[in-house]
Amino acid sequence: MSTSVGYRYITRNPGILSGEPIIEGTRISVRTIVEKWRIGYSPEEMVEGMPHITLAQIFEAMSYYHDNQSEIDEYIERNRVPDEWIHPLVRDL
């Protein structure tokens, strides 16, 4: 028996980021939250930089990621900027 998980703050809209999971009422994707977390931003720092979202929304985006990791990792890879497009001075930072 499988259980369906509902998310209060995560939604999809075909007209926003081609239906990628986003924080409801924004254009902020779950992918964006995960990428910020991976480079070292804390949830509190994310809210400071994006004051129109809440800690609860950040934590739910992370929860969504952990429940759907392969899907979000695919979005991350699909949206990665190729190394050859990055200026050498920036790439070496």
Image: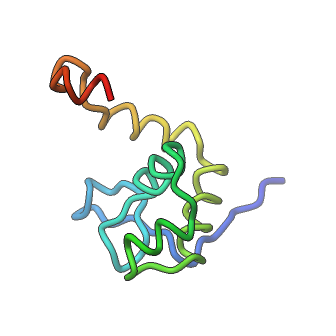
Q: Nearer the viewer, residue 45 or 53?
A: 45
Q: Which of the 4 image quarters holds residue 19? A: bottom left
Give the side of residue 78 with respect to residue 11, left or right.
Answer: left
In the rendered picture of this protein, how many numbered marks are placed on residues? 0
Q: Is residue 68 above or below residue 26?
A: above
Side of 53 relative to 60 (left or right): left
Residue located farthest toward the top when viewing the structure as drawn: 84
Q: With 58 as the anchor, is 93 left or right in this view?
A: left
**Image coordinates for residue 77, horizontal then vertical, percent:** 38, 31
Image x and y of residue 65, in percent? 58, 51
Residue name at image x 35 percent, y 80 percent:
25
Q: Nearer the viewer, residue 30 or 35?
A: 35
Q: Does 24 appear above or below 40?
A: below
The vertical placement of 91 against 21, above or below, is above
Residue visible at 46% across and 51% down in the picture? 36
Residue 17: quadrant of the picture: bottom left
Q: Nearer the viewer, residue 76 or 55?
A: 55
- At 49% from the left and 43% from the top, the residue drawn is 39
- Please tell me in which quadrant of the rendered image residue 61 appears: bottom right
In the picture shown, does residue 88 fall above or below 55? above
Where is the C terminus found, in terms of image quarters? top left
Residue 58, horizontal then vertical, whole percent: 54, 68
Residue 50, percent across and down? 38, 73
What residue is rendered at 51% in x and 80% in y? 54
Near-viewer residue (7 or 76): 76
Judge left or right: residue 18 versus residue 4.
Answer: left
